[in-house]
Structures are given as structure tokens and as C-alpha cells.
Amino acid sequence: MQQNQTIIPDGEENNFNFRDQLELYLMQWKWFVLSVLLLLAGAYFYLRYAVPQYKAVTTILVKDEKKGGMASELSAFADLGMLSGAKSNVDNEIEILKSRTLIQATVKELGLNVSYLSLGRVKSAEIYKNAPIEILFSTVSKDFYKKSHTYRIESSSDSKFTFYDETGKLGDYSYGQVIQCKEGKCTILKKQRAKLKGADNDFNITIQIHPMESVVESFKGRINVMPLSKTTSIAELSIIDPVSEKAEDFLNTMIRIYNEDAIADKNSISENTSKFIEQRLLLITDELDGVEKEAETFKKANRVTDITSEAGLFLQNASEFEKKEIEIETQLKVVKSMTDFVNKNDTSDLIPANILSTDSNASGLISQYNQLVLERNRLLKNAGPNNAVVQTIDNKIEALKTNVKSSLSQQKTALEINRRDLARQNAIVSGKITQIPTLEREARGLGRQQQIKETLYLYLLQKREETAISLAVTEPNAKVIDAALANKTPVSPKKNIIYLAALLLGLLLPFAIIYVKELLDTKIKSRFDIDGKSAIPFLGDVPTSETHNEIISATSRTGAAEALRIIRTNLEFMLNAVPEGTGKTIFVTSTVPKEGKTFIAVNLAGTIALSGKKVLLVGMDIRNPKLSEYLELPSKGVTNYLSSKEGKIEDYIVKQEGFEELYIFPAGVIPPNPAELLMNKKTDELFEQLKKEYDYIVVDTAPVSLVTDTLIIAKNADTFVYVVRANYLDKRMLHVPERLYKENKLPNMSLLLNDTQTQKGYGYGYGYGVEVEKKPWYKEIFK
């Protein structure tokens, strides 16, 4: 039998439909509203009883040499190239400010490990400065500050109170009285000026003593120290705490302790430096005295005062002595020449005059000698050599010549004496000049030692004064620019953010639940899970029936009734190939039981019968017949007819009350061999006879995934209505009808979706013109 088929390729699916997804969530709007209201209420109560956190901030200027800070006291030795790595900078000081030691000292000074709590009905508030009492411990155990301890003080009168520890009530005591408890001895003091807000003398206060390490870790984790910029040495310190005054006191006290420690460290360095300088001064003074005494002894032993000046004088004397020696040598040579000249010449020759510049006596004699020679030569021009006058002059000349020779000889002797004396003195001066380098080297060594000692001595004197000044005017490492100030508005919890988060979470939570539910739910929901995703024609869907055993009537206006009427019309298109005058067989089946195939078969038969057609409803699910749940039927039926050799069909068919043309052929007794019974030739003969007598034959068959009964009799069907129940059948089971359709095992097959939720947007919205009872919204939510 031919059938109209629209083949859709395997795996081809429709694109994502945003509108469908949006409608899926909009249908659950009541859950969204309920979730938002609950979370907003939770946010309100959270903000009502949450402990607000306040942020305190202080700004300081760290003395950094690289960024304009004051020089460190250790810079006294900076010019020596020593201790250059001891300069402070912002990064180092930030780590010191965040150190456990500094925070622990601050916690101890302020006693922040002890908390005073005012008990309330829901929450307890910490009292910081307004606590009316104070607890002091005189003796405690070794591990007292390593564990948590809780005490409760309940005022009984102006002078007495009741003391409770972790074990219970210890007794009634007076203020100032020593209390012996398990951890040691303590005293409760009453503060006269400190009172709780809105309270009188009666109070109930819990005292909590926390382990010191945990308190320090808490503050260390909450404090934040950061430089404001890379070009400045200004740092900002901040901390968040439930008590704003405590946060301010903590920051101010920590900066003060930090500066005090820095000043103490600097003073300690300065004091140690001063002691070191004093010791070195004593030692350098002794060494300097020793060097000066060695210099004095050296000068006395060598008879020198200033070696450089005396060396210049020696060199000058040596030069003069050498010059004089040269002059004397010249004069000796002149005297020798004059002597030789006088000895060789006769009386008529003149002796050279003005040659002997050093001896005036010899020069005078030579002058007289030359005058006599000139006189003699003049007389010889007029007289002879034997002239008496000439003879007298010759005698005088001879006498003077002898005197000249004697004078030259004396002068020569005197010059030789002078020469020897100059040579001796020059030798003495040369010896002293030779000793000058040695003396100068020794003097330079002594002078160097003396200069070093003097320089070091003066340096230490200068540094002693600088250290004394730095010790007297030591400044702190940090200058407070802005004192600690806590903002009046708490940083947490922030109402706007909490309410916004509650709103978003209220919207997100139902969305996530619905999304996960839809993601994990593999059941078929609507026609959109079938129509367009399968090659099998879609016949229609039937909404959930208000009465599961409903039998359609002419006056039925429910959604299920309207849907069955539409399906009746659609079936006519599936049966248009059946010849006129022949009964049309409609087989109803499903994948698994409880999908409503019997309900569809009964009501489909009734709907067709209401149109004036003669309809027979046949129960062919002989293993598990369900027609009796909807109709009052006899026990005998199809199985009895097929198993008997005699008997007529009319004996087993009954007419349904309320319908003129609706007849029922029950399933009958459950047989032991249902498959073999259906394979009987009598089954085919049965359908051939029924087609001649009835216009429509609606057959309720067995599920196809469990037994083969339906496949055995499928050849007798003109069309198959394959029922799929919404929110029951897994999508993964759709491969069963798809395979049967492709293999053409169920002729002229179409799908029908049963039990759809029209109020949730599925189906076509049946029931036009009919007043539908509306359920309360809370029933809709929690159904």
C-alpha cells in the first residue's frame, strides 16, 4: 500500500529556537518570583544581623634615600664606601610594617587578644572602649595565651558580680577581688566612666581570650600596606575590622611602635658607633705620638730640619764650589803661562798686563816692569846699551823681573791651596747630597705614617661629633601624613551589592535548576521533539485528560476530545488510498506499555462512531488486555474466536451503550500461545470479514518493543497510529518507530503524541469556547 512520505536525512535537526527556550522559562515565572522573594528576604535578614566591617586608613611618608627621604645615621661612614647596603627604602619598610613581630607588639600593647562582648538576643556586639569592666591576670599557665578561653560576667549589684567560666558558675565576687580559676588568678576591675549605650548598671558581658598567634595572624591577613606610586615614598596602611575605633587605634599604635623601634635601632647603632670611635681615638692618639717621636729622633740624628730646603742648599753650594774650582784652574794656567813667558823673554820684551785679575801685587810689579822696559827702549834710541842710565834701568828691570817671578810663584802656591780646599769642601757637599735620597725616603715614610694617623685622628673626631648629633636628634623612619581614620560607611556588607546578588541569584537559581532538569531529562516533551526531527508523519497530539477512563461523547468539549476530533480528520488523509466500500482498519500501538494506546484506541473509535460511521473496536493486545478498564465487556472475545473451530463472530461482539454505531470485540481470555494464535489463518479471515461489515475497524495492539504480536498482524492494517506518551518515553527510544518505518514493517505509519501538557504551552490549546476550571497558583506550582 502506497503512502505519502517525507524523508528527512538522519541526524538533521532544527536550529536552536530562542523563542522556545524563552517560553520554557517564562512558563515557570512563579518559581522565579518565589526564588527572588525568598533570596531577597534572606538578604534582608543577613544584612539585619550581619556584623558590619569598617576600613581604617592612614598615610605615612617613609624616609627613603632614593626618593627624597632623610639620610640614615649609618651614612656617617658612607664616604668610606662601607655599609652602602644599609640604606632604607620603601619596599623594605613595607615588609617591616607587615611583619609578625611588629603586629604582635601592637596586639600586646592594646590587648586586642581580649574581647568584651555584649550579649544580644540574636548576635553579640563587641565592646571596645565602652566596656564597663576590665579583666587582669596576675598569674596564668604556660599555655594560657595559646588557647581560647571564655568567661561571662553578670552584674548583680554596684559592687558585686557573678563570674562564669567554661565549666560553669564559679561564684559571686566583688570588684578588685582576686579570683582563682583553672587557668590562673584574675581580677575584675570596674570602669566608672565606661557604660554601655542605653544600659544601666546591670550588664551581662562575655569575655573571650583568643590565642595570641591566631589574633596576630588575623591582623596580619587583614592589614594592607602599599605604596601610592613608584616615584614617591608615601605608603598607605589600611585594615578592616568590625570595630572602627579598634582599627584606628591599631594603625596609630603600630606606626608609633614602628617608629620607636626604628629610633631604638638607630640609637643603638649610634651608641655602638660612639663607643667604637672613642676606642679608636685612644689607639690612634698613642700611635700618632709614637710616629711624631720617631720623626723628632730622626731629625736630631741626621741634623736636618727640612730635607728639601737643605738638599737645595747643598746642590747650590756644590755648584758654586765647582765654579770656583774652574776659576782657580783657569788662574793657575794663567799664572803658569805668565811664569813661562817671564822666564823665556829678555829684558826688552813687555810682560802682558791685566791678565792676573786676582793678584793686585803681581799686576803692580808687571806694570812697573813694563814702564822700565819702555823707558829703556826710549833711552836706547839716543844712547847705547852701556850707557849708565841704561845700565841702571837694566839692573832695575832684572830686579823687578825677579820680583815678578817671585810674586807669580806665590800666587800659584796660593791658588793651589785654594784649589785643594775647594776640592775637600766639594767632596763633603757631594757626600751629603748622596745621603739625601735615603734621608728623604726615610723622612717620607715617617711623614706618611704621621699624615695617615693625623687624617684618621681628625676623621674620627669629626665622626664623633656627627654621631653625637645624630644620637641627640634621631628622627623616626616614618612621618605620619594622615592619622588613621575609619570610614563611617562599612565596607561590608554592602547593601546594594547584597540585594543585587540576591536578585541575580534568585533569577539564576531557578534558571539553573530548570536548565539542568531539562538537560538531564531525556523524555519526550512536546511535538517539537518529534515533528520535523523524524521521517514519520506526525498525526497530532492529545493533551492530558482530566479523567483517565474518559470515553468521548457528542457533548465532550475537553481538550482531549477536540484533539481526537482533529486526529480523526487527519486520519482521513492517511486512509485516502483505501477503496470505497471497504472497511478501513486502524491499528493503534506503542513502544512500551502505559503510553495510552488503549485510551487512544477507545476514544478514537468513539469519535469516529459519533460521525455516523459504523465502527468496531477490536482488542488485539491479547497478552495484557486493557479495554475492560474503559468499557464493561464480557470475558470472551478474539482469543476465544480464534481458538475455536466453530462459532460466529457476532457471538463475541457487543454494542457499546450510548453509541449507535460503536461495537466492541474484546480480547478474550489470555491464551498460553498468543503469537501462534495470531499467526493462524483465521486471523486474516477475521479481518477480511470485518472489513465487509464495518466502515472502520480500530484495533488495540500490543507494544512493538516487547512482543511480536503486532508485527504478525500488521499486514491487515490500512494505517498504524503509533502512540508516544509525553514525559514518559525516552527520546532515545524513538529509534524503534523510526526503524519500523524505514523497514516498512508497520504500513502507513504515523505518530501520535499523547498526554501533552497544554497548560505549559504544548499542543494547540484545545477547548475553545469551554470554561476551563483554573487551579490556584500554588497548586499549579506544587502539583
Image: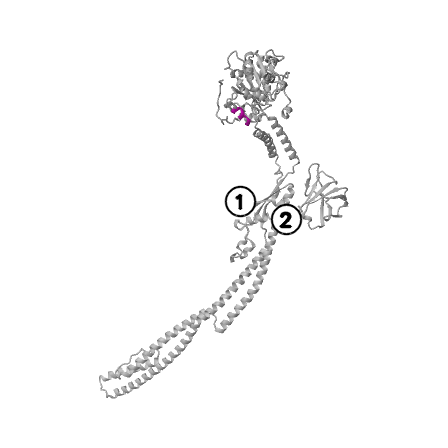
| Position in image of residue 73 (x %, y %) | 56, 55
Q: State the predominant SS element of the stretch in magenta.
A: helix
Q: Give SS at disc 1.
A: loop
Per the rendering, the mark at residue 445 is none
For the rendered model, the colour scheme is one colour
Front residue of this view, candidates 399 and 108: 108
- 673 w.r.t. 225: above or below: above
x, y (%) of residue 215? 64, 45
Q: How many marks?
A: 2
Q: Which residue is mark 2?
A: 104
Task: In this rendered view, identify the residue nearer to me: 163 or 156.
Answer: 163
For residue 505, which quarter of the picture?
Answer: top right
In the image: residue 368, left or right of residue 314: left
Q: Which residues are magenta?
A: 732-739
Q: Is residue 330 left or right of residue 773?
A: left
Q: Position of residue 89 (x, y in %)?
A: 54, 50
Q: Image height check: is 276 above or below 666? A: below
Asked whether residue 258 is in view, the answer is yes
Q: Nearer the viewer, residue 355 or 543?
A: 543
Pointer 1 residue = 229
Q: Does any portion of residue 768 appear in the rendered image?
A: no
